[in-house]
Image: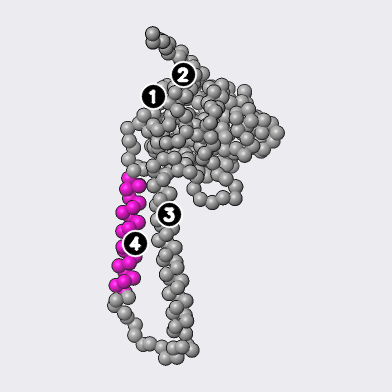
Amino acid sequence: MKHLLKLSGLMAAVSAVPAWAQENLRIEGLDIIGQPTDGETGFQPAVTRVAQDIHDLDYLILVIITLITLFVTGLILWVAFRYNKKRNPVAASFTHHTPVEIAWTIAPILILVLIGAYSLPILFRQQEIPQADLTIKAVGNQWYWSYEYVDDGFGFDSYMIGAPALGGENRKTPEVIAQLEEAGYTEQQFLLATDTAVVIPVGKTIVVQVTGSDVIHSWAMPAFGVKQDAVPGRLAETWFKAEKEGIYFGQCSELCGNAHAYMPITVKVVSEAAYAEWLGKAKAEYAGLEQPLTVASK
């Protein structure tokens, strides 16, 4: 398997175009959903339950801290107005106020209990790995990702389109734009699109085993609510179940060297039928396996 991965990476560098098994995934209606957008704020669309839970938790905390900020700001303004020297020339001499002290102790406790009661189930859901429908191993390298489809016995390397390994210069040149268009992307996907993508079926539980081959990397996919460090010598696991077909982009999210910004992640979520078709071709290309014969029913 290790030799197959190296060979596929070498072929990608020589050909400088996406592999034909990946080209067949340019299905009509497969929209680009998860990608960063210039000038906008907020999360990418959530297409997994965990990602939606993270969005809801963020909204809950935003509401809480906004109310606290407004309350404290209003209290400061009221005290400054009501108890300034002109309105209150003789300052009070007391040093304690038991009801207030009880209130400012109990209120934060209740707020933290609320946040904990909401966030801990989300954390447990992230950390408890369910039974996988498909297991993929992701290995971070300087500066590209290697993937193994563990149950199917094949793997491939995934380089950013425009990376030096593909004849690029990490710059948006006419040649790189041509490579992007050849792969079905536009120049807006520069720094996001890869020559080969992780392909998964929609609505299936995907377990990703993550590790690093040299330094610490991080496999992150915002639309899935996933971010897992890839530590050399350790095998970590994360999971997701994408509920919407489309193309999604992520990035290595752990500083890993001078080309850290140039090792993106591309995931294509497709129908089960499209995945089965791609899987047969991918096995033939990456592992040299014959496609199984299909006997037509009468």
**Residue to which mark 3 is pinned:** 59
Helix, strand or loop at disc 2? helix
Label 3 or label 1, whichever lies nearer to me, is 3
Q: Which residues are magenta?
A: 101-124
Residue at the extreme front:
298
Q: Residues within 10 Å of mark 4 (few under 14, many from 20)?
A: few
Note whether 38 is above or below 150 in the view shown: below
Image quadrant where one finds the N terminus: top left
Picture residue at 52% right of the left edge, 44% below the top:
255
Helix, strand or loop at disc 4? helix
Q: Amino acid at mark 2?
A: Gly
Compare marks 2 and 3 and give the one earlier in the sequence.
3
Q: Is residue 116 magenta?
A: yes
Q: Where does residue 260 sit, x and y in percent of width and height?
A: 56, 41
Compare marks 3 and 4 and give the one earlier in the sequence.
3
Compare marks 2 and 4 and give the one earlier in the sequence.
4
Q: Amino acid at mark 4?
A: Ile
Q: Which mark is residue 111?
A: 4
Residue at the extreme bottom:
90
**Residue to which mark 1 is pinned:** 151
Compare marks 3 and 1 and give the one earlier in the sequence.
3
- Cα gap from disc 2 to disc 1, whole angstroms: 13 Å
